[in-house]
Image: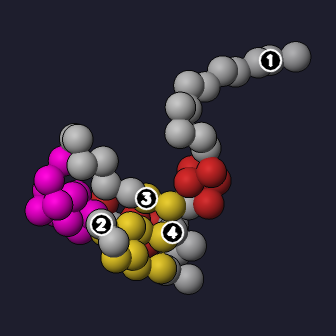
Amino acid sequence: MERSASCAPHGLDDLFAMVVWRNPARISLDGYAQRLASKDYAARWPRVTIILGKQYVKHN
């Protein structure tokens, strides 16, 4: 049997729920908006929820 390990101090709930958040320690809001536009997550994963600060964009 194969085993894998993960280090997820804040849990894996967002990963499995397909929620994308900005990490304010790593990227500015403008940089995050540019990254979202370039990655086009919604086209790749139609059920993704993108969190923009206190706002969110739900794609179904």
Q: Is residue 38 visible?
A: no
Residue 32 seen in render: yes
* Mark with earlier residue (2, 4): 4
SS at badge 2: loop
Tell me the colour scheme of the image: secondary structure
**What residue sits right under mark 3 in the picture?**
20
Report the span colored magenta.
27-37
Mark 1 or 4, nearer chain start: 1
- Label 2 and label 4: CA atoms lie apart by 16 Å
Disc 2: which residue: 53
Q: Earlier in the sequence, mark 3 or mark 2?
A: 3
The answer to whether 43 is drawn above or below residue 22 in the figure is below
Q: Quadrant of residue 2?
A: top right
Q: Which amino acid, by three-letter code, is at mark 4?
A: Val
Query: What's the mark number on residue 48?
Result: 4
> N-terminal of the two: label 4 or label 3?
3
Q: Please, what secondary structure does the residue beneath circle 1 have?
A: loop
Which amino acid type is marked by label 2? Gly
Q: Looking at the figure, which quarter contains the C terminus? A: bottom right
Please report contact status of discs 3 and 1: CB closer than 8 Å, yes or no: no
Residue 6 placement (x, y as % from top left) = 61, 25
Nearer the observer: mark 2 or 4; the answer is 2
Between 11 and 39, the residue placed more toward the observer is 11
